[in-house]
Amino acid sequence: MKIGFIGLGNMGAPMAANLAKAGHEVTGFDMAPVEVAGVTRAASAAEAARGADVVVTMLPNGQILRAVAAEVIPAMTAGAALVDCSTVDVDSARAVAAEAEAAGLLAVDAPVSGGIGGAAAGTLTFMAGGSEAAFDKAKPLFDIMGQKAVHCGDAGAGQAAKICNNMILGVTMIATCEAFALADKLGLDRQKMFDVVSTSSGYSWTMNAYCPAPGVGPQSPADNGYKPGFAAELMLKDLRLSQQAAGSADADTPMGQLAEALYAQFVENEDGKGMDFSAMLPRFEKRGRE
Ligand code: NAD
């Protein structure tokens, strides 16, 4: 396939490289002067999109996605697909899909989980929203860049699945960290805490697979000085998107709201920026009850 790839950052560059390595003809564009192995550089987003069967975008936020979409949609050929893999707000995802469809294009919102490691290894999970035809067109590319693609529903459903998952993740990480900090103060050994909780009803992915306590459980960013991994500011971004969506859908999400406030405090007023999101544990460790 002829593929245009826009947004060659930490995630986009390895994803585009994997598409090229699999034999696709990839033309890429980024505002920053980046070179990606096997990817031809275009002078603009529109140039990267012109004549492409599929245009993939991997951009920082919904506002930038809307601006890029306004530029690439008129350059694309009817029947081609616009596949956005960025994490953006549900409203932007739906607006871009509507514009693309009005221009005779197929559209998929397909945010990912798996992080930079997953992007490089081609083991991402894609959560996709859009028509059956759009998903089918993008699926062979998902199979190269990832190991699993779930078609979640119509436009916006991929973003909805992503932010709901990450709202659970943020809330659960906080719960796991505050419980470890309480256990410390009660004189409970962390390894014993792990042994019990990881096989009891308090178990979760954050405890069992990504334990925030150094030296306990499987290898995780906690064992590497809390270097990300999944940075606290990216968790904050996703929690904000979840609360923005909850606001527009009139959903009551008190735990998500509190998780957003705690990560905002951690990232903006404490030392959380640049740390893994599991560094909530040392944060709680240092604090007392106010
Ligand atoms: P990044 O900042 O490394 O990459 C974004 C790229 O977009 C940059 O290279 C930037 O120059 C480029 N860009 C910005 N505006 C542009 C424009 N108008 N035209 C062309 N290029 C433009 O970010 P990233 O870590 O690659 O993340 C990309 C998306 O993936 C985000 O939405 C993020 O939330 C999501 N995501 C990231 C991770 C992760 O672990 N990094 C995991 C899952 C999802």
Image: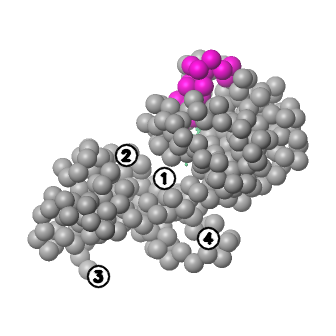
Query: Residue 16 appears in which quarter of the rendering?
Result: top right
The amino acid marked with disc number 2 is Pro
Ligand 1 within 8 Å, label 3 CB: no
Residue at mark 2 = 228
The amino acid marked with disc number 1 is Leu
Magenta range: 10-26
> Where residue 246 is drawn, which disc sits there?
4
Q: CA distance from mark 3 to mark 2?
A: 29 Å
Q: Pick whichever of labels 2 and 4 is earlier in the sequence.
A: 2
Ligand 1 within 8 Å, label 4 CB: no
Residue at mark 3 = 290
Q: CA distance from mark 1 to mark 4?
A: 18 Å
Image coordinates of residue 56 in percent, x first then y, are 68, 36
Going 51% across and 36% down the picture, which residue do you hit? 147
Classify mark 4: helix, strand or loop. Answer: helix
**Contact between labelled residues 4 and 3, with CB atoms less than 8 Å apart:** no
Q: Left or right: 199 with respect to 132?
A: left
**Contact between labelled residues 2 and 3, with CB atoms less than 8 Å apart:** no
Q: Pick whichever of labels 3 and 4 is earlier in the sequence.
A: 4
**Tag in front: 3 or 4:** 4
82 versus 2 height, above or below: below
Q: Pick whichever of labels 1 and 2 is earlier in the sequence.
A: 2
Residue at mark 1 = 234
The amino acid marked with disc number 3 is Glu
**Contact between labelled residues 2 and 1, with CB atoms less than 8 Å apart:** yes
Q: Quadrant of the N terminus?
A: top right
Q: Residues within 10 Å of mark 2 (few under 14, many from 20)?
A: some
Q: Is residue 62 visible?
A: no
Magenta span includes 21? yes
Image coordinates of residue 154 in percent, x first then y, are 73, 54
| Residue found at the very far bottom of the displayed protein | 290
